[in-house]
Image: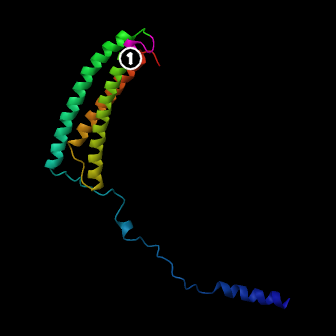
Amino acid sequence: MKMLWLSALVLPLAACAHDATPYPSLAPRAVEKLGFAEPVVTVAEAKPDPALDARIDAWQRQLDTIAKGFAADAARTETAAARARGQTVGSDAWLDAQSALAGLDDWRSQASALLTDIDLAASDRAAALLPVYPALAPLRERAAAEGERQAQTIDRLQAALPAA
Protein backbone atom coordinates (compact mmCIF):
# COMPACT_ATOMS: atom_id res chain seq x y z
CA MET A 1 0.00 0.00 0.00
CA LYS A 2 2.88 2.36 0.75
CA MET A 3 4.24 1.65 -2.69
CA LEU A 4 0.95 2.53 -4.31
CA TRP A 5 0.78 5.75 -2.32
CA LEU A 6 4.36 6.65 -3.28
CA SER A 7 3.74 6.06 -6.98
CA ALA A 8 0.54 8.12 -6.79
CA LEU A 9 2.62 10.96 -5.37
CA VAL A 10 5.51 10.73 -7.88
CA LEU A 11 3.41 10.32 -11.01
CA PRO A 12 1.88 13.86 -10.96
CA LEU A 13 5.30 15.34 -10.24
CA ALA A 14 6.68 13.73 -13.43
CA ALA A 15 4.06 15.59 -15.44
CA CYS A 16 5.42 18.89 -14.15
CA ALA A 17 8.92 18.17 -15.47
CA HIS A 18 10.24 20.68 -18.02
CA ASP A 19 11.42 19.36 -21.45
CA ALA A 20 14.57 21.21 -22.48
CA THR A 21 14.59 19.81 -26.05
CA PRO A 22 14.45 22.65 -28.63
CA TYR A 23 11.61 22.31 -31.14
CA PRO A 24 11.27 24.24 -34.41
CA SER A 25 9.02 27.23 -34.40
CA LEU A 26 5.60 26.90 -35.99
CA ALA A 27 5.83 30.42 -37.37
CA PRO A 28 5.92 30.72 -41.18
CA ARG A 29 9.40 30.37 -42.62
CA ALA A 30 10.86 32.87 -45.06
CA VAL A 31 10.37 30.56 -48.04
CA GLU A 32 6.71 30.07 -47.13
CA LYS A 33 6.16 33.82 -47.37
CA LEU A 34 7.28 33.86 -51.02
CA GLY A 35 4.17 32.14 -52.36
CA PHE A 36 3.65 29.19 -54.62
CA ALA A 37 3.63 30.83 -58.05
CA GLU A 38 5.85 29.27 -60.70
CA PRO A 39 9.05 31.20 -61.28
CA VAL A 40 9.48 33.02 -64.56
CA VAL A 41 11.92 31.14 -66.76
CA THR A 42 13.73 32.91 -69.54
CA VAL A 43 14.35 30.79 -72.60
CA ALA A 44 17.92 30.95 -73.81
CA GLU A 45 18.38 31.88 -77.44
CA ALA A 46 20.76 29.74 -79.46
CA LYS A 47 23.70 31.70 -80.78
CA PRO A 48 24.62 31.22 -84.44
CA ASP A 49 27.03 28.33 -84.93
CA PRO A 50 28.64 28.47 -88.40
CA ALA A 51 30.17 24.99 -88.05
CA LEU A 52 26.82 23.46 -87.15
CA ASP A 53 25.10 25.43 -89.92
CA ALA A 54 27.56 23.95 -92.43
CA ARG A 55 26.85 20.44 -91.11
CA ILE A 56 23.10 21.06 -91.31
CA ASP A 57 23.43 22.22 -94.93
CA ALA A 58 25.44 19.09 -95.76
CA TRP A 59 22.86 16.91 -94.05
CA GLN A 60 20.04 18.58 -95.99
CA ARG A 61 21.83 17.91 -99.26
CA GLN A 62 22.50 14.32 -98.17
CA LEU A 63 18.83 13.86 -97.26
CA ASP A 64 17.79 15.23 -100.67
CA THR A 65 20.15 12.77 -102.38
CA ILE A 66 18.81 9.86 -100.32
CA ALA A 67 15.19 10.80 -101.00
CA LYS A 68 15.76 11.15 -104.76
CA GLY A 69 17.78 7.94 -104.97
CA PHE A 70 15.18 6.01 -103.01
CA ALA A 71 12.34 7.35 -105.17
CA ALA A 72 14.12 6.32 -108.38
CA ASP A 73 14.96 2.86 -107.05
CA ALA A 74 11.47 2.45 -105.62
CA ALA A 75 9.98 2.94 -109.09
CA ARG A 76 12.28 0.22 -110.45
CA THR A 77 11.42 -2.02 -107.52
CA GLU A 78 7.69 -1.49 -108.16
CA THR A 79 8.22 -2.76 -111.69
CA ALA A 80 10.27 -5.74 -110.50
CA ALA A 81 7.68 -6.57 -107.82
CA ALA A 82 4.89 -6.42 -110.40
CA ARG A 83 6.79 -8.92 -112.59
CA ALA A 84 7.35 -11.19 -109.56
CA ARG A 85 3.68 -11.36 -108.56
CA GLY A 86 2.42 -14.84 -109.12
CA GLN A 87 5.93 -16.20 -109.61
CA THR A 88 7.39 -18.88 -107.37
CA VAL A 89 9.93 -18.19 -104.68
CA GLY A 90 13.39 -18.44 -106.20
CA SER A 91 12.32 -17.60 -109.72
CA ASP A 92 14.36 -15.04 -111.66
CA ALA A 93 11.62 -12.39 -111.33
CA TRP A 94 11.35 -13.01 -107.58
CA LEU A 95 15.15 -12.79 -107.17
CA ASP A 96 15.23 -9.56 -109.17
CA ALA A 97 12.53 -8.07 -106.92
CA GLN A 98 14.40 -9.18 -103.78
CA SER A 99 17.62 -7.63 -105.09
CA ALA A 100 15.77 -4.40 -105.80
CA LEU A 101 14.34 -4.46 -102.26
CA ALA A 102 17.85 -4.88 -100.90
CA GLY A 103 18.82 -1.70 -102.74
CA LEU A 104 15.91 0.10 -101.08
CA ASP A 105 17.08 -1.21 -97.70
CA ASP A 106 20.45 0.39 -98.40
CA TRP A 107 18.77 3.77 -98.96
CA ARG A 108 16.75 3.30 -95.77
CA SER A 109 19.89 2.50 -93.78
CA GLN A 110 21.51 5.68 -95.10
CA ALA A 111 18.45 7.67 -93.99
CA SER A 112 18.61 6.01 -90.58
CA ALA A 113 22.32 6.79 -90.21
CA LEU A 114 21.64 10.42 -91.15
CA LEU A 115 18.88 10.63 -88.54
CA THR A 116 21.30 9.21 -85.98
CA ASP A 117 23.88 11.88 -86.85
CA ILE A 118 21.28 14.63 -86.44
CA ASP A 119 20.13 13.19 -83.10
CA LEU A 120 23.73 12.95 -81.94
CA ALA A 121 24.34 16.63 -82.75
CA ALA A 122 21.23 17.59 -80.77
CA SER A 123 22.18 15.41 -77.80
CA ASP A 124 25.75 16.77 -77.84
CA ARG A 125 24.34 20.29 -77.58
CA ALA A 126 22.09 19.21 -74.71
CA ALA A 127 25.01 17.55 -72.93
CA ALA A 128 26.97 20.78 -73.23
CA LEU A 129 23.93 22.60 -71.75
CA LEU A 130 23.50 24.63 -74.92
CA PRO A 131 20.00 25.69 -76.02
CA VAL A 132 18.14 23.83 -78.75
CA TYR A 133 19.40 24.86 -82.18
CA PRO A 134 16.38 25.98 -84.24
CA ALA A 135 17.51 24.49 -87.57
CA LEU A 136 18.01 20.99 -86.16
CA ALA A 137 14.39 20.24 -85.24
CA PRO A 138 12.86 20.69 -88.73
CA LEU A 139 15.71 18.75 -90.33
CA ARG A 140 15.24 15.93 -87.82
CA GLU A 141 11.49 15.84 -88.50
CA ARG A 142 12.10 15.74 -92.23
CA ALA A 143 14.70 12.94 -91.92
CA ALA A 144 12.40 10.93 -89.62
CA ALA A 145 9.48 11.35 -92.03
CA GLU A 146 11.65 10.24 -94.95
CA GLY A 147 12.79 7.16 -93.04
CA GLU A 148 9.19 6.30 -92.15
CA ARG A 149 8.05 6.79 -95.75
CA GLN A 150 10.84 4.52 -96.97
CA ALA A 151 10.00 1.85 -94.39
CA GLN A 152 6.33 1.89 -95.42
CA THR A 153 7.24 1.59 -99.11
CA ILE A 154 9.59 -1.33 -98.44
CA ASP A 155 7.02 -3.09 -96.25
CA ARG A 156 4.31 -2.65 -98.88
CA LEU A 157 6.50 -4.01 -101.66
CA GLN A 158 7.76 -6.89 -99.51
CA ALA A 159 4.18 -7.85 -98.62
CA ALA A 160 3.28 -8.02 -102.32
CA LEU A 161 5.93 -10.68 -102.98
CA PRO A 162 5.61 -14.35 -102.10
CA ALA A 163 7.33 -15.05 -98.77
CA ALA A 164 10.45 -17.19 -98.80
Q: Is residue 16 left or right of residue 46?
A: right
Instruction: Tell me if residue 123 comes above or below residue 15 in the rendering.
Output: above
Q: Residue at x 21, y 34 (%)?
A: 62
Residue 22, horizontal then vertical, whole percent: 51, 82
User: Circle 1 sits in a helix, a strand or a loop, which is it?
Assistant: helix
Residue 68, horizontal then vertical, whole percent: 22, 25
Q: Which residues are magenta?
A: 88-94
Residue, far top: 86
Instruction: Tell me if residue 121 comes above or below residue 32 in the rendering.
Output: above
Q: Residue at x 43, y 15 (%)?
A: 90
Q: Residue at x 42, y 15 (%)?
A: 161
The residue labelled by disc 1 is 95
Q: Is residue 90 magenta?
A: yes
| Quadrant where the image shows the N terminus | bottom right
Q: What is the quadrant of residue 6 in the picture?
A: bottom right
Q: Is residue 136 left or right of residue 24?
A: left
Residue 88, horizontal then vertical, whole percent: 45, 11
In this rendering, the count of numbered labels is 1
Q: What is the quadrant of residue 83 in the picture?
A: top left
Q: Amino acid at mark 1?
A: Leu
- Front residue of 7/97: it is 97
Q: Is residue 57 magenta?
A: no
- Front residue of 15/89: it is 89
Instruction: Tell me if residue 21 comes above or below residue 118 in the rendering.
Output: below
Instruction: Tell me if residue 91 comes above or below residue 10 in the rendering.
Output: above
Residue 47, horizontal then vertical, whole percent: 16, 52
- Front residue of 6/124: it is 124
